[in-house]
Structure formats: structure tokens, C-alpha cells
């Protein structure tokens, strides 16, 4: 049949139908560090709902707004009444429900979808290693919590500088508060992401993280109060450490920086400070180990 | 009530990791009761305090969130709810069945441990054990209904549920007395106060208001969830 046709036109590129335009990449390859950093930034944006639907932005930004309220009220009090409001070191503790809900509602987002859709092998087929992946997720959650707790402190500090209250500026208290916020962010992020990573379901992850917060706080308060009523203040001071917020307060703000405690009772002194720091570091390490173990298993499926 | 749906829902609720969370909460309550017993702080006041703040204040809303949203939200999340909705079963019946499952689970995991914890501490003194057990039952039923409705209405059911339980009932309720009138916990405590004669338990809501509010909220939430399922639209994941 082909003989009857006129001479074929000049040869078009053969097999053009299959060439869907994949091109070779010749640009610079930025490597593992950049990939991990990109993953961390992407996760951090996602925690605040940036790059997601408008609905996903509501909860983080409303919580952030509530977190800012005491700072705004305190600045107004300083400006109008010449009175100091909330202290820097007690800020996160007074508002502890907000970071806890933020952690519970957002940490499952960072880990659950990847587990649920089993895309971990795709990440790991790139230069990113398991440690990079877990590190990026932890860094993103830590940064998000630090923004949530440190921005109000900084706004409050700037407000204090601008209002120019009588008396010295509380710089050391501000710095202690910032260190406390950083330690709290690391601890909460590690615990929250570790707990959330055990279920691929977002809803259950949220419930599990908030259950952890409410249980630790509830047990700490119940045991501490009962021990104080029984007159055993030494034992009660240890009971407060069950709550992660008081643990960080005792370890960093009171222990390292020598500020006044913001808990319902005193914290253990002397060896207790070292113990509080050890417990805090131990909990973080335990969470990271649990996360790595969890992801080893998830990646091998 | 549909037996097959109930069976499937029970399996989904109790057969996976969810059940560990459901077991953990009552276990902590009982552990606390044992601890109080061991250190000798097992007076009526400490018992009422433990049950009020921990059993009703922490355990009950958490069980409500886990069971109430757990009966329906994962199915909506997965999209497998279409298999259920495409069957010739009345949607209100589906909602009622799921509610009964959630309510029975909350009741079982909350009522029995609450009674046991109180009994362990002070026996049957002053009706504290039976009062709080009844409170856990009625409160758990109301929570199950409300959180199931939330699970049907929104994809962020668990988050909104815990915001209600922690911020509204926990923080706002402590500072704004008026907010206590609109809190499942407070209604449940009022019921406990009615049964128990303990002087350490005081509530500031009338029993009539509390009981009618519990009934209205439970029935209303189940009916609304049924209506909502009738015109249910599956939206994609974000």
C-alpha cells in the first residue's frame, strides 16, 4: 500500500507522539541539606495553613490571635494605667491551653498525610534520609510553636521599651522567657509529633495529643493538690513536674535563669533542678528515638 | 437501629488503635484513685475533687471526642461513607445507630471506672459513687451526640471538639459564671449533686435546667446529624 503513495514528506521527528517533553535537568544539584530545608519550610508553612485551603488557616491563626491578646492587654495596661500585666516567664503557662491545642491540632498534619498515603518511600528515594525527614518535621513544628510563644513575648518587650515604664526594663526576665519558650517548643514539638506519628489518622492524632496534654496536666494538678493538702510539700513539688509546661518552667526559667516559678506551688530545688533538666532532655530524646523507630517501620513497607 | 451498621461501627471503634486511648483514660483515673488510697488522702473531699476535675472534667470529654467523632469521622475522611449512604437505609437511622454505638462505648468506659474509682476511695458514702456514675452516663451520652454531630458537620471535628472542651468548659467556664450554664460538664455535675448528698459538691444550675438541657442537646444533635446526612455532600480533602 505504501508504494502507491507519493513520495513521503521530509521526515518529521519519528515517534513524536511519545515525546511528552521531559527534559534533562542540567542545573546545579543543591543536595541533601537543601532538600531537608525545603521540606522543613514546606511543613512550617503547612502548620500555619499557608499553601492550604482557607479553612486550614482559620484554626492556627485564631489560636495565634488569642495568644497575642494578653500581650496587647498588657501593653495597654502599661500605657494607660502604668501597671505591669502578665510576666514574661508566666506567659506560656497562663496561656498553656492555646499552645497545647495548637500542638494537638497541627502536629498530626505534619506527619499523618505522608503516613496515610504511604509516600515515605518516595521521599527516601531522594537524597533525603530518614533522619533528615524526621528532623525537618520536628524543626518545622518547633519553629511553629516558637513563633506562637515567642512573638507575643517580643511584642510585649517592644511595647515595654516604647511605653518607657518607670523602673528598669525587665530584659533578663524577657530573655529567660524566650529561653523557656524555646525549650517548651522543642519539648512539646518532639512529644506531639512522636504521639501523632503513631496513627495515620488525623482525627485520632489530634485526640491522642490533646489526651496527653490533659492527662499530664490533670494528673499533675490532682496529685500535687492532694499532696499539698496532706502537708507533703516536698512530694508535691515533684508532682508539678508531670505537666510539661511546669517541667520547662522548673528546668529552664527557674532552674537555669533563677526566675520566680509560675506554677501552683514550689518546684524541687538543688538536685531537683538537675533532675528536671534531665527529665526534659530525656523526654525529648525518647520522642526522637520513638519517631525514628516508627519511621523505620513505615519506610520499610 | 441497624444491627449490621452497629456491628461494623463497634469493630471500627474498638478494633484499632483507638481502643488503646479509650482504655488509657479510665486506667489513669483508676491509677489516681489507687494512688490517693495509698497515700491516705481518701477523704470525701479529695474523692469529690478527683471525680469532678478528672473524671468529669478531663476523662469524659476526651472519651466523648474519641468515641463520638470516631464512629463517623474516619469513614467520611476515607470516603468509605458512600458505601454506607448508598444503601437503602434511612439516613436518620444511620445517625441514630452510630449515636447508640458511641453513647454505649462512652457510657461503658466512663460510668464503670467512675463508680469503681469512687467506690475504691470512700465506698458508697454520701451517694458520691452513684451520683458521679450517673453524671458520667448522662454527660457521656450528651457528649457522644454532640461530637458525632460535629463529625458529620465538619472535617475539623476533633479540633473544634477539644477547643470547646478545653477553652469553653475549662477556661471560660472558670472565669465567666454565665458560660457554665452552657456546659455539658456542669449539667452532668448538677445531676451528680442531685443524687449525692456530699457537702463538698456544689453546683449553681437548677436540676430542671440541667436535665432538660441534656435531653434537648442529645436528642437535637442526633436529629440534626440525621438531617445533615440526608443531604450529605462529599468534599475533597484539602
Image (cartoon, rainbow, N blue to C red):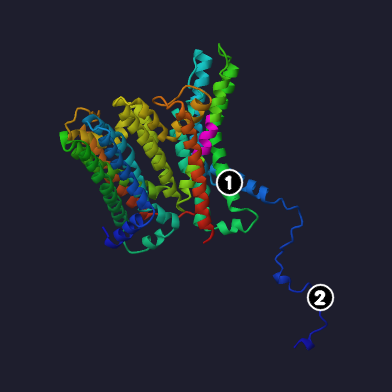
Say if A268 sits above or below B237 in the image.
Answer: above
Chain identifier of the residue bearing label 2 in the image: A
Do we see residue B184 in this rendering?
Answer: no
Looking at the picture, how far across and down is residue A206, in whole percent? Answer: 44, 45
Q: Do marks 1 and 2 share a chain?
A: yes
Q: Which residues are magenta?
A: A180-188
Task: Left or right? Give the position of A174 relative to B8.
Answer: right
Q: Nearer the viewer, mark 1 or mark 2?
A: 1
Looking at the picture, how far across and down is residue A147, in whole percent? Answer: 56, 34
Q: Which mark is residue A11?
A: 2
Disc 2: CA contacts within 10 A as few (<14), some (14-19) or many (>=20)? few
Q: Which mark is residue A135?
A: 1
Disc 1: CA contacts within 10 A as few (<14), some (14-19) or many (>=20)? many
Q: How many callouts does the rendering have? A: 2
Indicate which disc, 1 or 2, sits on the residue closer to the N terminus: 2
Where on the picture, by quarter, is residue A265? Answer: top left
Residue A187 in the magenta stretch? The answer is yes
Q: Which mark is residue A254?
A: none
Looking at the picture, how far across and down is residue A214, in whole percent? Answer: 38, 38
- Residue pictured at 71% horizontal, 50% vertical: A30
Say if B120 sits above or below A202 in the image.
Answer: above
Q: For the residues marked 1 and 2, what is the alpha-carbon distance in whole angstroms?
A: 54 Å
Looking at the picture, how far across and down is residue B222, in whole percent? Answer: 30, 48
- Residue pictured at 51% horizontal, 23% vertical: A258
Chain identifier of the residue bearing label 1 in the image: A
Say if A57 sits above or below B93 in the image.
Answer: above
Task: Left or right? Give the position of A279 relative to B70.
Answer: right
Residue A101 in the magenta stretch? The answer is no
- Residue pictured at 36% horizontal, 51% vertical: B20
As helix, strand or loop, the secondary structure at mark 2 comes to loop
Quarter placement of the N terminus of chain B: bottom left
Amino acid at each position: 500500500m505504501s508504494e502507491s503513495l507519493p513520495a513521503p514528506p521530509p521526515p518529521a521527528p519519528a515517534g513524536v507522539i511519545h515525546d511528552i517533553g521531559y527534559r534533562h535537568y542540567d542545573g546545579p544539584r543543591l543536595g541533601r541539606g537543601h532538600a531537608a530545608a525545603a521540606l522543613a519550610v514546606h511543613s512550617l508553612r503547612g502548620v500555619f495553613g499557608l499553601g492550604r485551603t482557607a479553612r486550614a488557616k482559620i484554626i492556627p491563626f485564631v489560636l495565634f490571635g488569642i495568644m497575642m491578646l494578653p500581650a496587647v492587654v498588657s501593653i495597654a495596661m502599661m500605657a494607660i494605667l502604668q501597671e505591669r500585666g502578665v510576666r514574661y516567664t508566666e506567659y506560656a503557662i497562663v496561656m498553656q491551653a492555646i499552645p497545647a491545642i495548637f500542638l494537638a491540632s497541627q502536629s498530626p498534619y505534619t506527619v499523618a498525610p505522608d503516613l496515610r498515603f504511604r509516600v515515605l518511600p518516595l521521599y527516601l528515594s531522594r537524597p533525603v534520609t530518614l533522619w533528615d525527614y524526621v528532623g525537618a518535621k520536628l524543626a518545622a513544628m518547633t519553629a511553629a510553636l516558637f513563633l506562637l510563644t515567642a512573638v507575643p513575648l517580643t511584642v510585649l518587650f517592644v511595647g515595654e521599651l516604647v511605653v518607657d515604664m518607670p523602673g528598669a526594663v525587665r530584659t533578663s526576665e524577657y530573655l529567660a522567657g524566650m529561653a523557656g519558650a524555646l525549650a517548651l517548643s522543642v519539648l512539646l514539638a518532639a512529644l506531639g509529633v512522636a504521639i501523632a506519628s503513631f496513627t495515620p489518622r488525623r482525627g485520632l492524632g489530634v485526640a491522642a495529643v490533646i489526651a496527653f496534654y490533659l492527662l499530664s496536666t490533670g494528673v499533675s494538678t490532682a496529685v500535687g493538690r492532694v499532696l499539698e493538702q496532706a502537708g507533703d510539700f516536698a512530694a508535691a513539688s515533684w508532682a508539678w513536674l508531670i505537666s510539661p509546661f511546669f517541667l520547662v518552667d522548673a528546668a529552664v526559667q527557674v532552674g537555669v535563669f533563677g526566675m520566680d516559678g509560675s506554677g501552683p506551688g514550689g518546684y524541687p530545688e538543688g538536685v531537683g533542678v538537675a533532675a528536671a533538666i534531665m527529665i526534659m532532655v530525656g523526654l525529648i530524646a525518647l520522642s526522637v528515638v520513638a519517631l525514628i523507630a516508627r519511621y523505620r517501620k513505615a519506610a520499610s513497607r | 437501629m441497624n444491627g449490621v451498621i452497629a456491628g461494623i461501627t463497634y469493630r471500627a471503634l474498638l478494633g484499632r488503635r483507638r481502643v488503646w486511648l479509650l482504655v488509657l483514660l479510665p486506667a489513669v483515673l483508676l491509677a489516681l484513685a489507687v494512688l490517693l488510697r495509698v497515700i491516705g488522702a481518701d477523704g470525701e473531699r479529695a474523692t469529690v475533687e478527683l471525680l469532678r476535675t478528672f473524671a468529669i472534667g478531663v476523662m469524659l470529654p476526651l472519651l466523648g471526642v474519641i468515641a463520638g467523632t470516631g464512629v463517623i469521622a474516619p469513614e467520611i475522611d476515607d470516603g468509605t461513607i458512600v458505601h454506607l449512604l448508598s444503601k437503602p437505609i434511612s439516613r436518620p437511622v444511620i445517625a441514630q445507630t452510630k449515636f447508640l454505638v458511641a453513647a454505649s462505648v462512652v457510657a461503658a468506659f466512663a460510668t464503670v471506672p467512675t463508680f469503681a474509682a469512687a467506690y475504691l476511695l470512700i465506698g458508697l458514702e454520701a451517694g458520691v459513687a452513684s451520683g458521679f456514675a450517673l453524671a458520667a452516663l448522662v454527660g457521656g451520652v450528651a457528649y457522644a451526640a454532640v461530637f458525632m454531630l460535629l463529625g458529620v458537620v465538619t472535617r475539623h471535628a476533633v479540633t473544634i471538639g477539644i477547643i470547646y472542651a478545653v477553652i469553653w468548659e475549662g477556661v471560660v467556664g472558670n472565669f465567666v459564671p454565665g458560660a457554665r450554664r452552657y456546659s455539658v460538664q456542669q449539667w452532668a455535675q448538677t445531676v451528680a449533686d442531685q443524687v449525692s448528698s456530699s457537702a463538698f459538691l456544689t453546683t449553681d444550675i437548677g436540676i430542671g435546667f440541667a436535665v432538660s438541657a441534656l435531653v434537648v442537646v442529645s436528642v437535637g444533635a442526633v436529629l440534626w446529624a440525621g438531617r445533615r446526612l440526608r443531604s450529605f455532600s462529599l468534599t475533597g480533602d484539602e
